[in-house]
Image (cartoon, helix red, strand yellow):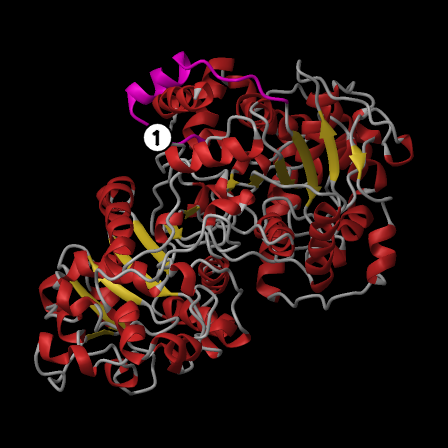
Amino acid sequence: MGRLRVIPSAQLLLVSFALVRGFPVLPRSSSRSNPSTAWYQRKDDSDIESNQNILSRCLVEEYEGYSNSLSQSQEKKRVLEELEPQEPMWRSLFRKLAIKRKKRPGSLVLLRCCESTFNLNQTFTGWLDPPLSDVGVKQSQHAGRLLLSEGFDVDVVYTSRLKRSISTGWHALETMDSLFIPVRKTYRLNQRMYGALEGISKEETVSNFGMDVVEAWRQSLKAQPPKLSRDDPSHPIHDRRYNDVPPEMIPDTESLLECQRRAAPLWEYQIKDDIKNGKTVLVVAHRDTLRGLLKTIDNIDDEDISEIKMPKGVPMVYRFDEQMQPIEPSDTSRKQVHTNGLFLEKPGKTLEILGQESSPIPVHAKHEIERRELTLQESMDSLRYGATIETEEVEMVSAERWSDDPCEFEDYDIFEAEIGDSEEEIVPTILSNDQLLSNQTMEGPFVVLIRHGRTPHNQMELFTGWEDPPLAEEGVEDARNAGRLLKRHGFEFDVVYTSWLTRAIQTAYYTLEELDQLWLPIVKSWRLNERFYGDLTGKSKKMIANKYGEDQLKKWRRGYTIRPPPVSSYSLNYPGNDERRAKHFKDLRFSVRESIARSLETKRLSVHRKFPKTESLKDCMDRSIPFYTKRIKDEAIGKGKRVLITSHENALRGILMHLCEIPEEAMNQLHLPNGLPLVYDVRRKCLSLLDDGSGKNPGESHDFGPAAKYLFTSCEIEDLK
């Protein structure tokens, strides 16, 4: 009895101190488009000063980095504003006053981004944004297998805002079946800014300026390459992904020291705190930013930092004592000089495993090469003494037709009498490119909702719910088609919301990849998960019909308030038994019954949250609608942001029920096709489809069910001109 009295008291104390952690502050983006990037060359110039003079000028130039202009408190504020969630003042105060149990420090995993298409030509890449090569994708997947084989359970990931870093982290997490993990994207982890050298072959640079000059630019701690003019369209200041960064913080060029100082505050005020709280942190970044972190962590001398190497795709692991000092590994065979990190495999072995395969080098426009020749010439003149182009027209990709998931078409007949004549003609608003460009829709706020692509479970007619299958090949194409269609119409987004389930996260990723907007913050929440089908999860619909009858099956599937049989607390399908995900739930109240039962079983205090054991359609909407109204609306739509939501049919039904004022009795008559973008105009309060260029009406090509008459109401485009 004494044990039973103590547990509720402890639980009440824990509940009082339970604080909900949110997601990164969302940057406001403008409508400026990203300038195209290319490779560039420098032509010989007889009147350029000697290479030796340039080298001397670089080495003696006084270091006046932009990072030195901020005090320590200002740096901390910058980092927290970029990455920390916004929270009420009372919660912030409560967090500071709460007595926290001392935790054993977690681990730090450093992973250099893998091979990009520019690496094949030994190009100065810097803040340019090439994708991974085919070999780079394989390297990333191999890194994920290494982490998985060593038993690492990552809690949070940090990447740069460059796609080669983001994609490396993505493929590693996908291999580890951990796509639900929060990923924070920050410019502080971007590669060193090489100024006017970016996009130029290193071999060509050596032939023009000499090995000494190039090595000084690459390896010297304080030498800066020539600056890139801020008038150049390819300068990062014109890239909307950095609109939340103060202009004075965006470099024109960087020395190695400046790059390292840019990354240092992220370690001091964010990553370090995560590790102190027992989290395993994965940092996926670039050579020079990772070397900067190593210099800070191991206190490496300036003259020794040039000896530090970071091979692509090989994770390096750090462990820390209670004073956050790195612990020297016992196995020194995979330890690098001057560091206390341990490589998970011998550097170079990855290339042997992959057979040093090669990928084709992309072809770039000649006029861009000629333009950068002039840019580099001007920068060198500026270095020695103290232009606008038109954006290349993008070829539109014609959108393919979708093939809706046939097994998701429900049996409507038993409910049709409740919502009236299902044969009423529905004429949804179709938005063309000209209409979007001539009205205010593209300026935001607006919401685009996409149901995830098809999965193998759909094809087998299984109750999927919270089970986590990946997209089928057809589902990947569904997501890519959605991205192509949105790109065709010029859509840009500021933030993405998705669930914790792989199929929805993959849909978001492939859509953004087609849009070339992988750098966007992706907010993942279990509240956008599919309806939890309880004991029906993973079972065939035909099997359930044979066991319980067709009528009972229809009630469980279509009844608004009817819940399927609950799952057992000891079932593998019970969400609380998925320890990797369960520890990330922060906004569920605690369960006294489950906590007592598990404490008695383990003979130690075990605090357990109240995870759902089954859900009706109403239960699912009771979590998705408040997430939209209290989270998405407040932090994004209310600030004029352009929002993309990739989720599941029942979660999206709830949001559409709120947006389109669909009555409860009609909700089970609404069907959402896989991978079809639905555009909601916040100002006009109406839902529209996009013209896919086929000449057919998308409203006729897809079956939205009898409740479609509530979904598509009149939307007068001409009023927005």
The picture places residue 561, in percent across and down from the top left corner, at: 21, 60
Q: Tell me the magenta residue range.
A: 84-104
Q: Is residue 534 left or right of residue 448?
A: right
- Residue name at image x 55 percent, y 43 percent: 579
Q: Is residue 323 above or below residue 180?
A: above
The picture places residue 466, in percent across and down from the top left corner, at: 44, 58
- Residue name at image x 53 percent, y 54 percent: 572
The picture places residue 242, in percent across and down from the top left corner, at: 45, 41
Would you say residue 235 is visible in this rendering? no
Name the image quarter holding the C terminus: bottom left
- Residue name at image x 85 percent, y 31 percent: 336
Q: Is residue 99 magenta?
A: yes
Q: Residue furthest right?
A: 333
Give, as a three-letter code, the residue at label 1.
Gln
Mark 1 Cα shell of 10 Å, populated few (<14), some (14-19), many (≥20) = some
Quarter of image, res 688: bottom left
Q: Is residue 277 above or below residue 505?
A: above
Q: Is residue 37 left or right of residue 338?
A: left
Front-lying residue, 656 or 373: 656
Q: Is residue 476 magenta?
A: no
Q: Is residue 532 above or below residue 590?
A: below
Quarter of image, res 682: bottom left
Name the image quarter holding the N terminus: top left
Q: Which residue is mark 1?
A: 86
Q: Residue furthest front?
A: 1
- Residue name at image x 81 percent, y 23 percent: 328
Would you say residue 633 is visible in this rendering? yes
- Secondary structure state at the residue bearing disc 1: loop
